[in-house]
Amino acid sequence: MIDLNKNYDVIVVGGGHNGLICATYLAKSGRKVLVIEANQSLGGASATSEFSDQFSVSSCAHWLFQLNPDVASDMGLNKQGLELAARDLNTIALAEDGNHLIIDGDNLEGAGISDEDRVAFVAFNKQILKFAKLLSGAFNRRAPKLVEGNLTDRITLAKLGLGMKMLGKDDMSDLMRLALINIYDVMEENFDNELLKAAISLDSLLGSHMGPRSPNTVYGYFYRRMGDIYGFSGPAVVKGGMGAVGEAMAKAARASGVDIEAGTAVSKINIDIDRATGVTLADGRVVDAGFVVSNADPKTTFNKLVGLTNIETGIARRVKAVRMKGDAAKLHIALDSLPTFAGLSEQQMGQRLLIAPTMNYIEKAFNHSKYGEYSAAPAMDISIPTIHDTSLAPEGKHVMSVIVQFAPYELEGGWNDENKEVFKQLVIDRIADYAPDLKDKIVASELLTPADLEERFHIHGGHWHHGEISLDQILTMRPFPGASQYGTSVDGLFLCGAGTHPGGGVMGLAGHNAAKEIIKRGKSA
Amino acid sequence: MNNHSFLWTGDLIFGILNSNIKKTERRLTLADCLEWLNLMKKYDAIIIGAGHNGLTNAAYLAKAGLDVLVLEKNGYIGGATVSRELYPNWKYSNCSYVCSLLRPEIIRDLELPRHGLQVVPYGGGVTFKENGDYLGAHADHERMLRELARHSKRDASAYERYEADVMKQTRLIRPFLMRTPPDPTSLKPRDLKELSVLAKSFGSMGEEALADTMRFWTMSIGDFLDEYFETDVIKAHLAGSGIIGTALGVYSPGTAYVLLHHYMGDVDGSVGAWGFARGGMGAVSAALSASFQSFGGTIQCDAEVAQIIVKNGKAKGVALANGDELYADIVVSNLDPKRTFLKIMDEGDLPADVVKKAKNFKIRGSSGKLNIALDGLPTFTGLPKDSPLCLGEKHFSDSLPKMERAYDEWKDGTWSKDPYVDMLIPTQIDPTMAPPGKHMMSVFVQYAPPKIHGGDWTAEDKAGFEKTVIDQISNYSPDFKDLILHCETRTPQDIENEVGLTEGNIFMGELTFDQLLFNRPFPGYAQYRGPVKGMYMCSSGTHPGGGVMAAPGANAAREILMDLKLTNTVPGGYDDD
């Protein structure tokens, strides 16, 4: 609730998980903070929605696998009721003949996996985690400026540099090569098993507009594996769906003194010449504050809320250049009972299931999205959370949540109900190749394209990460040069969402880092 | 040699020869002795491969006073920098076909013009549109702007900003072409110093400019162009330089950097200009060879090297395919890294990591070529016959998605059915390549894979590929097919077989950052020294990479002379921008 008598120090626009985290840290530092969220529920794209009578599903992200543990503990999320229905799940790369590949931490089973691949996998994981650990040292700090940085930045760079040297000559050489290469070539160099290569490739590009052969994808893989550094040896299912994460964070925020106004949209961030002064709400009310922190993506922030006419041309051009066209759709299915996947036990059906038989399959699916087409043979990440969490559906019934790659944000000719239905059926057919009785059990289904995700979660392009996590849009270039340390060219206006360093996913570091930066700058910002 | 050792040697030789007499059963002659002595002769350096980098490397070593031998498997020198008369009275630059990247420092220093090299710049080019229109790229700046404005006024005004931004990036890397890359993993003073030179150069740019440079190096050419231009054909015309010779598409990250490889050369100081070597690209090799020989060097053709001889961890010389052995303490390979380490060196002589890295070195071919003898000059509909645009390069892909689809087909293991071509008729400027009134056409094609769906190219495949290209050109030139007297079609497989470029990759290794600068050919071996003492690399598989630059050969020579503690004869970068 907005208390118009309070003189808020900070207004956080958007109650996504990063916004709530940022608000909490700021409130703990003694500031008076207000979070304003357009949707009724909090958590942004970490959300649960009832998509069919009595059937609920995580409507965007559906696994928790890289939440930073320090942030989780600072927020006291366990105390606020966040519960995991299952954790450290396996990843099962499905094979049409039922001979699936099971990835359990360092272990590989099934699919005729060779001993060479097993040994290579252990070595590969070891090296990747070494590199991810190195990178994590730069994740919970602001992105260092390379040339004009101050002492803080120099320390981060020195840490990174020293860390790299400490890797030893061989690992350091490997890192220099891996950071810049594509996952397809790395897979070909290391492994034989097609399912294994495809599964790792898919991991490196979920949520992105890239294929396995696109340079940059190995960085995407490092990013994904950050979860291992944060204590996850596999994805987790949150009880109540991902919306429970948002709820727990909102409770934590309120417990720290943050005021939260939900169901109210901000229509404008008010600027007086070059200083942010507060916000104007959709209903016309004006709320003033010395600092405005936007949890919205950079394009929404600058194009919609600030208005391009209120910033200089150079910045406007930079905002325009940020690449954030989403390519991941969500398919939600309400099921009358559990379908049968050939070769999978019920317990296995509760693991993370992938449909990506080969890297070329993924590449072909990606090809279509470059031309504004969807693919009839998409790659998928499937979750049936009701196996662990019965609260999402009536007894004995289930929900299936599917991430579908690739479905372009801007379909040639535009998405409409007709082509959405066609695409949805294609995706269902594809899953039915692995679970033949699926269609008979479908009670209801919905497909959310990136355009739908944009509308629902107010993310431009429907892009999960508020901007591609590619080498030209990370660190000192994220979201764009000049705005890479959460501040912007407008005094008092900050960014704290996934569009800032380190990036997206339900990680919580963007919000954390932004808060630290604002606190650091104190009154001088 | 004093009398003692001479006699001793003579005794030794006589003894050895005599022991052989039992096998040959023929009388020993003086000729035999002399031949034996000749074979026992030791050169100061042996260069394997008379490609342009090998010749450059050899020239600088010879200039420093070394006794240098260059060995070439073919009957002709030049590698992929050749002019070949493959049809009576026609000369084909049948691999590389235009000149720009050849380092001016080397041209001047080795006196290549004195040895016959003359590069004539050509201006402009054109991309034909499917709807009959075209985009002309004029050498004259004002004319270019007017032509761009004809398509889009906005793009015309963006063009100057685009050119300036690309030039900024070009200026940044040019000084590093003639420098040995530092090894970031080492703590040696030299590497630290070189790293600080790099850091200083980047540091002086300021944070935003540095960030822009990093963006530029990691972006795709498609995304980069999307930031400036709105017109499809303009983007398509400019994007070609980002994918020529690569196994990447216009939307693949890293292709904006490749653009620089096509902009950072010059012709007589005009940065970014391209030209024809008079007499074809073979003139470059001929001039390099003449320069080399003027310093006392020797070239032997029809001398394929089968093995680098290594004893006790040191290079001792080479063994030829015919069994002959030639000796030198310095052996420089101008072959690509895969061929060098996996074909002509014994796995037992190499550290395990080098073998693995050589196997992982990416050198996939993606380009094909058609070299065509024409009975006259073809007409291109939509372009007046006397338009200056006819003199330049011609392309027939008018949008980025078209070019990207061509790449998709390469990934799929087949040639592009609607390929991107870079087509030129050099005889309009250099009449020496064909009889009077007749013409030579060079068609560079992207994309063609090294194997078709995993198998070798068949005759049908090649014919299909040839037909695809000829049909595409015919769509824009109605009299073209009738003028064809002869067509030499080259797939990556042909390029490999003839020139020795593994998998037919024209840059001798893909130009992606995981294989550039201190990663080229592999991390730890990016300073021209091989893993065996006395063995070096000087090919385009080393920094700064492929294209007819001669910089790898020169940089390698500098390192060799440094190791020999001889005075350096190799010039540094000019920095004369």
Image: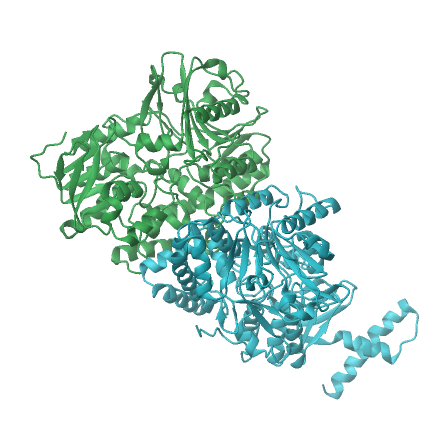
Chain colours: A green, B cyan
Question: Considering depth in this image, is B464 or A298 the residue closer to the camera?
Answer: B464
Quarter occupied by residue A297:
top left
Give the x, y percent position of residue B271. 48, 68
Question: Considering depth in this image, is B182 or B544 the residue closer to the camera?
Answer: B544
Residue farthest bottom in this picture: B3
Judge left or right: residue A205 versus residue B55: left
Judge left or right: residue A320 versus residue B80: left
Give the x, y percent position of residue B70. 68, 71
Question: Considering depth in this image, is B123 or B340 the residue closer to the camera?
Answer: B123
Quarter occupied by residue A292:
top left
Image mark count: 0
Q: Is residue B446 visible?
A: yes
Question: Considering depth in this image, is A245 or A468 the residue closer to the camera?
Answer: A468
Q: Is residue A124 above or below residue B83?
A: above
Name the image quarter holding the C terminus of chain B: bottom left
Give the x, y percent position of residue A271. 17, 46
Q: Is residue A32 visible?
A: no
Q: Is residue B493 above or below residue A504?
A: below
Name the image quarter holding the N terminus of chain B: bottom right
Q: Is residue A443 above or below residue B151?
A: above
